[in-house]
Image (cartoon, helix red, strand yellow):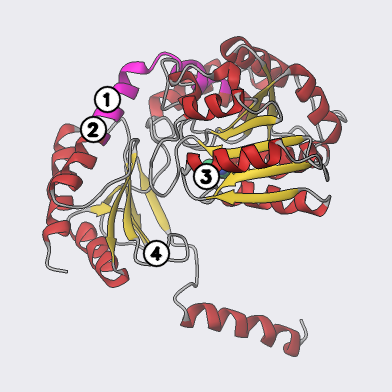
Amino acid sequence: MNERLLAYYDDKLATLKSKHNYRSFANINHRKRYISIDGGERLLNLASNDYMGMARDEALHDEFMQTVEHDKLPFASSSSRLLTGNFEIFDEFEWQLQQLFGRACLLFNSGYHANVGILPALCDGRTVIIADKLVHASMIDGMRLAAQNGTKTVRYQHQNLPQLAKLLDKYQQDDGIDRIIVATESIFSMDGDVTDLAALVRLKRCHDKVMLYVDEAHAVGVRGERGLGCAEEFAVIDEIDFIVGAFGKAVASMGGYVICHKIMREFLINTMRPLIFSTALPPVCVAWTQFVFSKLIHMNHERQKLMTLSQQVAATIRRAGLPCPSASQIVPVILGDNQRTLDAAAMLRQAGFYAMAVRPPTVPQNQSRLRLCLSADLGQQELDDVLQVVSGVINAAP
Ligand SMILES: *Cc1c(COP(=O)(O)O)cnc(C)c1O
């Protein structure tokens, strides 16, 4: 490659490094719940999205490999579902999810595909998307693409439902707007807080232009009696127009889905570009997702356990004097100062735990934090150790 062209990008990398925003892959060795980084000591992984421990359950893998019918489940789909990439397993799993949720289901290659594809497909110049300030990058990218066909996009302060209500009143009365999409998440990835979906549904009832779009990426498998997410827990599955989720976290696989009206499903099949123009998931991957999902439905006991231990960690943080917005398995220890957060992450490592230190711009200024991701397969001793070290880092002199 041309030296001068290369130098331009190399300079950009140097700027990232100087701003401490440079990213690179670590060499990680996985051993069940433990990891070791770059050949370092063994650490309990508190940064994984494997909330139900399904991805590291070797017995589960063996069971799947024994039941899977290899001849019917190729390792590649070899084209888009609209060409010849549709296999029976896709229809079968969608049908099962439809039975569970009570509405049509459409599968995607990932949660990212779902969010960058559905939002632009639904929108035009007479649509406004109103989104929570802290929604995931994939929804932001979906909004950017939607803006290209004239869609208006507006953000409201994180979880500020009174502000959202005012915006809804405004656009409900706007003759230039026919459709309002309210886009949010049920469990937010940095604060671990849970959106009041019942309140959102009440707002929708007062505004007939509104469609609710809720991303349950961190909630599917984790919340609700059958693990269908917070929409199940709040008993509002029928009222959320688009329930989006991802299989890469608690469901221990890969892929995304939307639950919606069957007409909307049909519409997305005809208009959604990441669905039309990308090769479908490998059938064997969909079969694994289906297999894990069928187990998760019956794991309410484990979900309760995860909830209880998450509450214990949050309570410990609050007792030590820090506010903690979490109501889920994602529990932030918000220390504020960057250096203090890095020091705390180092203390955790010393004690045998790995947690992400999250700093601006990922979170607002003075909100640097350790982000603890808990899982249902955490042992009592491990939990006690976590509680002790968390108290320790909070009490350590700033
Ligand atoms: C992880 C995540 C996604 C992306 O899902 P993938 O399947 O990993 O692409 C989308 N939305 C939210 C809220 C997420 O946390």
- Kindly indicate whether the residue at mark 1 contacts the one at mark 2 (C-beta within 8 angstroms): yes
- Residue occupied by mark 1: 305
Q: Distance between the residues labelled 2 and 1?
A: 6 Å
Circle 2 Cα neighbour tier, 10 Å, few/some/many (<14 / 14–19 / ≥20): many
> Dot 2 corresponds to which residue?
309
Tell me if residue 73 is in the magenta stretch: no
Q: What element carries label 3?
A: helix
Residue at position x 52%, y 33% in the image: 216
Q: Where residue 264 sits: x, y (%)?
A: 77, 24
What type is the residue that disc 4 sits on?
Arg
Q: Is mark 3 within 8 Å of ligand 1?
A: no
The residue type indicated by label 2 comes to Leu
User: Label 3: how many residues lie within 10 Å, few (<14), some (14-19) or many (20+)?
Assistant: few
Is residue 235 positioned above or below 337 on the image? above
State the residue in front, 34 or 296: 296
Closer to us: 398 or 291: 398
Q: What's the distance in space between the residues labelled 1 and 4, CA to CA? A: 30 Å
What element does badge 1 sit on?
helix
What residue is disc 4 on? 359
- Is residue 278 visible in the rendered image? The answer is no
Q: For the residue carrying disc 1, how many other residues have a C-alpha within 10 Å: few (<14), some (14-19), or many (20+)?
A: some
Provide the secondary structure element on which disc 4 rests.
loop
- Looking at the rendered structure, the kind of residue marked 3 is Gln
Check the picture and name the quadrant holding the N terminus: bottom right
Quadrant in which ligand 1 is drawn: top right
> Disc 3 designates what residue?
163
Quarter of the image for residue 309 reads: top left
Crowding at dot 4, Cα within 10 Å, few <14 / some 14-19 / many 20+, comes out as: many
Up-down relation of residue 209 to residue 138 (above or below): above
Tell me: residue 14, above or below residue 235: below
Q: Give the range drawn in magenta.
A: 290-310
* Residue 297 lies in the magenta stretch: yes
